[in-house]
Image: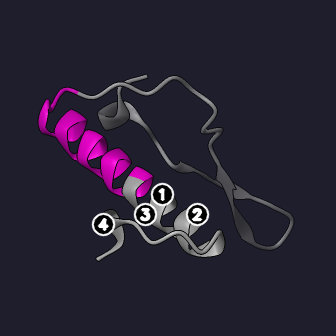
Amino acid sequence: MNISEFHQGTQRQQFQYRSFQPALTNHAWTWEAPEIHVLLAEGIVGLENWMACHWSFRTLIATSKCT
């Protein structure tokens, strides 16, 4: 599913009120902008570095990545 075509849900008329029915989000997502791939890759590297530092501190091993 292309993320630009996603609709967040619909409003339904209930007995005496309207309610919001969210759409299912369990789809394979795609996007057109290549910058998103770069941002995701940078985020993954940052998360990996953070996890390495966090694990290092928990095991009392100092690493140069954590400064």
Tell me how many marks there are.
4
Secondary structure under badge 4?
Answer: helix
Q: Which residue is mark 1?
A: 52
Of the image marks 2 and 4, the number of the one nearer the N terminus: 2
Q: Horizontal and vertical percent for residue 40?
A: 30, 43
Q: Amino acid at mark 3?
A: Trp
Vertical order, 67 against 12 (above or below): below
Q: In the rendered structure, are the residues bearing label 4 and label 3 in contact, judged by CB atoms less than 8 Å apart?
A: no
Q: CA gap, disc 1 to disc 3? A: 5 Å
Q: Nearer the viewer, residue 11 or 36?
A: 36
Q: Amino acid at mark 4?
A: Ser
Residue 66 occupies which quadrant of the picture? bottom left
- Mark 1 neighbour density, 10 Å: few (under 14) some (14–19) many (20 or more): some
Of the image marks 4 and 3, the number of the one nearer the N terminus: 3
Q: Which residue is mark 3?
A: 50
Disc marking residue 55 = 2
Vertical order, 6 against 29 (above or below): below
Vertical order, 43 against 60 (above or below): above
18 drawn magenta: no
